[in-house]
Amino acid sequence: MKMREWVRFPSKWIEDGGLKQLQWTNSEVSGSNNIAALMVLAPIAHHADDEGVAVCTYDRLALATGLSRAKVSAGLTVLEKLQVIDRAPSGRSTFRLLNYSEAGGWSKLPARGLYGAGRIIGFEHFHLRTMNELHALKLYYLFARRRSNSTNMAHISYDKIEAYTGIARPRIRKGISFLASVGMVHVEHIPSRANERGTANAYRLPFIDPYAHLGTRGRDSDFALAE
């Protein structure tokens, strides 16, 4: 079956502070497992059926993410502990996204456009070695959760980013820059509501409603200003 442009992604756990639990601790292994968890979550969501159940072998998850089978397994364990997925609900190589049908609890997650030859292209730049990789992925999922249907952008301040993700404010810009450099987010500069002469940042994920952006709607329109 052809992959959809975007998929339904249960994301209330992000609103409830789940991303804050994924930290780069003194143990590099723990930090890399947390990166692996957020990487492997994407292809599970991309292959989920209408009940939130995905059939994905370790080989498919390894191909999509570029991770070893051992790291795929470690990432799945992290997701299970976070209560984001349930492993083997319908037998081997199946995963259920928890709270899939919860009202107001899901977001759009980009899907088909992310891939090339079965692999998520942006993930080629993730090597599980740095705190910034973890921060970048946490930001990616946060922007998906906070995306506005009316503007196709996430309008969120650094203070709120820090509150939702646990990323220290001085490190947020570096994480956003990493995401932008690998083509996983577009940073838009929009008129600020707080200062009529100022600007604010908003964040747009590629491959969701690709024709809804400032170039087609106008930088000074209500589209740009909407919350």
Image (cartoon, rainbow, N blue to C red):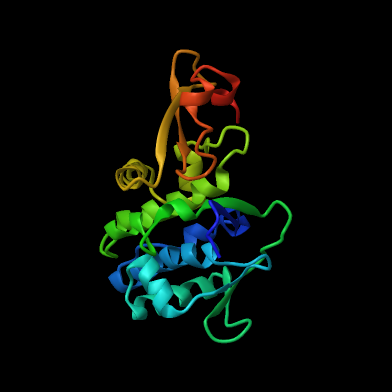
* Residue at screen point 48% across, 36% down: 157
Q: Is residue 166 visible?
A: no
Res 215 visible: yes
Q: Quadrant of the N terminus?
A: bottom right
Snapshot quadrant of residue 67: bottom left
* Residue 161 relative to residue 101: left or right: left
**Label total for image:** 0
Q: Is residue 183 left or right of residue 2?
A: left
Q: In terms of depth relative to the viewer, which is nearer, 16 or 75?
A: 75
Q: Where in the figure is residue 183, as x and y percent of width and height?
A: 35, 45
Q: Which image quadrant: the C terminus?
A: top right
Q: Is residue 132 left or right of residue 202?
A: left
Q: With respect to residue 227, does 141 lie above or below?
A: below
In the displayed structure, 206 sits above or below 155; it is below
Snapshot quadrant of residue 132 = bottom left
Q: Residue at x 63, y 81 (%)?
A: 89
x and y percentages locating residue 204 in the rendered image: 47, 39
Relative placement, left or right, of 207 versus 96 is left
Measured as percent of width and height from the top left, residue 47 is found at 54, 66
The residue lying at 46 percent from left, 79 percent from top is: 57
Asked if residue 94 is positioned above or below residue 32 in the image, the reply reads: below
Residue 155 place in picture, x, y as percent:
53, 35
What residue occupies the far front of the structure in this picture?
Answer: 1
Q: Residue at x 52, y 82 (%)?
A: 93
Which residue is at the far right? 103
The residue furthest top is 197
